[in-house]
Image: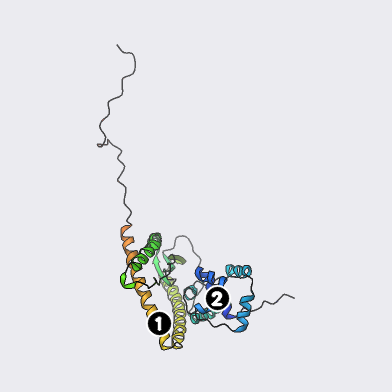
């Protein structure tokens, strides 16, 4: 008889999934185990603490390496709200164990040649996802723009942090923004028929909206459980992060404007006027 798998406690599953997408939290979890839960406001019961502390480091590392996170839930696990991550677990389970609800994601049509419309998913530097539809040429242009942005993304972060640290008004206030993730632009499906393409876009957008609403409600419940002092800290942290992101985006636009690709001058195949004329070659043959 096949051996039955032992279900993973939800608290430990949250920690492992967050470590799978967040390198900083990954290191924290391996080093301090149950204490890492406090960083995201996650309450573990005694059995979960005992189980987590009893896992050898090499085994925990392997579990994290094999753990996958749904692209739709990635943004939740990149955050710091345990309630949002717990809600995302339910979303992942629904995706894994059953068909989508009515009006959800329908099977994509197979691609046949060069289709006119491209349905694609875009992920920004915060890990937030969106779905969009473009004609194939416009999609290719958008992919090029994202590749260009990714080339200067880290430079913009370093420049924004340097400006923040040099601001006398912010002395002693750590730059609250993490290193941005690279932007992504991934093709989901292609279509020849506009109506079919727009229908699929609508269904996928509705699915994204449901997940965003679930995450929003979970965050509201988390905030509702905080004290007045805790709410004040959350508002202050959010305001600082917003200011840091605005500074980062300003530096990003500056770098993008500066990274224009210069067109090389055309190659002249005639006489170059920049060089002095050369003497004609010496005649060969018998001298008189």
User: Does 262 sit above or below residue 255?
Assistant: above
> Residue 236 occupies which quadrant of the picture?
bottom left
**According to the image, label 1 marks what residue?**
233
Instruction: Say which of 102 and 84 sits in front.
Output: 84
Label 1 vs label 2, nearer the camera: 1
Q: Is residue 219 left or right of residue 48?
A: left
Give the x, y percent position of residue 165.
35, 68
Q: Secondary structure at mark 1?
A: helix
Residue 267: mark in rendering: none
Q: Residue furthest top?
A: 288
User: Does 256 sit above or below residue 31?
Assistant: above
Give the x, y percent position of residue 198.
41, 73
Q: How many marks?
A: 2
Mark 1 / mark 2, whichever is N-terminal: 2
Q: On the rendered image, what quadrant is the C terminus found in?
A: top left
Residue 213 makes an appearance in the image: yes
Q: 10 Å neighbourhood of mark 1: few (<14), some, or many (≥20)?
A: few
Q: Are marks 1 and 2 in contact (CB under 8 Å)?
A: no
Q: Is residue 9 left or right of residue 150?
A: right
Residue 108 makes an appearance in the image: no
Q: On the rendered image, what quadrant is the N terminus found in?
A: bottom right
Give the x, y percent position of residue 98.
57, 79
> Residue 190 occupies which quadrant of the picture?
bottom left
Q: Secondary structure at mark 2?
A: helix
Q: Is residue 112 left or right of residue 250?
A: right
Separation (CA) of disc 1 from disc 2? 24 Å
**According to the image, label 2 marks what residue?**
15
Give the x, y percent position of residue 271.
27, 35
Instruction: Say which of 260 and 36 sits in front.
Output: 36
């Amino acid at each position: 008889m096949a051996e039955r798998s032992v279900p993973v406690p939800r608290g430990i599953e949250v920690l492992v999934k967050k470590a799978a997408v967040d390198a900083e939290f990954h290191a924290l979890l391996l080093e301090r185990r149950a204490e890492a839960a406090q960083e995201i406001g996650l309450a573990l019961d005694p059995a979960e603490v005992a189980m987590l502390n009893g896992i050898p480091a090499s085994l925990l590392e392997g579990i994290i390496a094999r753990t996958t996170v749904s692209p739709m839930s990635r943004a939740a696990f990149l955050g710091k709200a345990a309630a949002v991550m717990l809600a995302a677990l339910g979303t992942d389970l629904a995706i894994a164990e059953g068909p989508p609800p009515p009006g959800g994601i329908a099977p994509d049509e197979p691609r046949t040649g060069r289709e006119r419309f491209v349905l694609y998913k875009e992920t920004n530097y915060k890990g937030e996802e969106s779905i969009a539809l473009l004609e194939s040429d416009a999609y290719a242009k958008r992919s090029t723009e994202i590749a260009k942005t990714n080339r200067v993304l880290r430079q913009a972060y370093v420049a924004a942090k340097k400006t923040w640290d040099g601001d006398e008004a912010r002395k002693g206030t750590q730059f609250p923004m993490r290193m941005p993730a690279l932007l992504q632009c991934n093709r989901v499906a292609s279509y020849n028929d506009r109506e079919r393409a727009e229908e699929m876009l609508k269904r996928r957008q509705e699915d994204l909206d449901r997940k965003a609403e679930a995450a929003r409600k979970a965050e509201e419940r988390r905030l509702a459980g905080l004290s007045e002092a805790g709410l004040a800290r959350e508002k202050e942290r959010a305001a600082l992060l917003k200011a840091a992101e605005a500074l980062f985006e300003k530096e990003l636009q500056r770098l993008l404007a500066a990274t224009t690709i210069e067109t090389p001058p055309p190659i002249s195949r005639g006489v170059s006027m920049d060089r002095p004329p050369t003497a004609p070659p010496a005649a060969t043959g018998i001298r008189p």
